[in-house]
Amino acid sequence: MLPILFLLFLLISCTHASIPEICVANLKGPQTPAGYTCKDTTKVTVEDYVFAGLAKAGNTTNIIKAAVTPGFVGQFPGLNGLGLSLARLDLAHGGVIPFHTHPGASEVLIVLRGAITAGFVSSANTVYLKRLRKGDAMAFPQGLLHFQLNSGKSHAIAVVSFSSPDPGLQITDFALFANNLPSALIEEATFLDDAQVKKLKGVLGGTG
Ligand SMILES: *[C@@H]1O[C@H](CO)[C@@H](O)[C@H](O)[C@H]1NC(C)=O
């Protein structure tokens, strides 16, 4: 009789140990690969589920003439555990989001204004390239190198959506040239010449 009661108890506790549907990120707590712990539910408001950041143009006065305004879990705590997030892209005339990857998410981009040429490269080194116009959408598979550049005559705007609340962003040029890895090693590891490596380090803030 006792083992049966114990099994019954286990069954009931498992049924109740489901993931809570309301789990707004407690941004003061630790972040783990599984997300943040839940903020006290009595303190959760609709504002945790609303993000106003996409309405405002990002500052494109920079070397890439572009800006990414993230609506990731850090800015939009209601996304914790929901498996999605957003960002706004602003590309001034001549602007580019250089080759980059999101280690944690696939991406869908929707052009809201202007024309954007976007592409990604598969693991087999096949290039998938398209000039997108207002209203067009394009998907970028998780982890693959991709870029977006303004191929129109005016400011371009896009909204991107990710399959993770925290997709991550690694821009290849910054990873290679905005750190203190000795130039000689970078030259050996990339086949680029010394002048090019030093020039890019100078522009992007690397040393060594
Ligand atoms: C945009 O960024 C540039 C460079 O950092 C800065 O000088 C400028 O004041 C910024 N503009 C606005 C409107 O914040």
Image: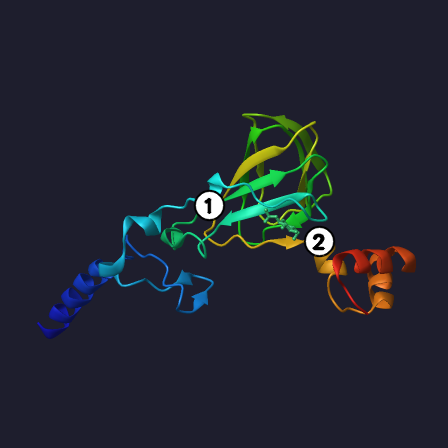
Q: Is residue 135 above or below residue 190?
A: above
Mark 1: amino acid: Gly
Q: Secondary structure at mark 1?
A: helix
Q: Which mark is residue 27?
A: none
Quarter holding residue 2 = bottom left
Measuring from the top left, give residue 18's x and y in whole percent.
26, 58
Residue at x 71% of width, y 53% of height: 172
Q: Is residue 118 above or below residue 4?
A: above
Distance in Å between CA atoms under marks 2 and 1:
26 Å
Observer-nearest residue: 173 or 188?
173
**Which of the marked residues, 2 or 1, is nearer the chain's N terminus?**
1
Cβ of disc 2 within 8 Å of ligand 1? no
Question: How dense is the environment of label 1, judged by Cα within 10 Å: few (below 14), some, or many (20 and up)?
Answer: some
Q: Which residue is mark 2?
A: 172
Q: Is residue 103 above or below residue 119?
A: below
Instruction: Assign the N terminus to one quadrant of the image.
Output: bottom left
- In the rendered structure, are the residues bearing label 2 and label 1 in contact, judged by CB atoms less than 8 Å apart? no
Residue at x 15% of width, y 71% of height: 6
Instruction: Assign the C terminus to one quadrant of the image.
Output: bottom right
Measuring from the top left, give residue 50's x and y in whole percent.
36, 46
Asked whether the viewer can see residue 182, the reply is: yes
Q: Secondary structure at mark 2?
A: helix
Cβ of disc 1 within 8 Å of ligand 1? no
Q: Which residue is mark 1?
A: 53
Of the residues tagged 2 and 1, which is closer to the observer? 1
Left or right, residue 194 beside residue 67: right
Mark 2: amino acid: Thr
Quarter holding residue 75 = bottom left
Residue ranking furthest to the left: 1
Q: Is residue 59 above or below residue 155?
A: below
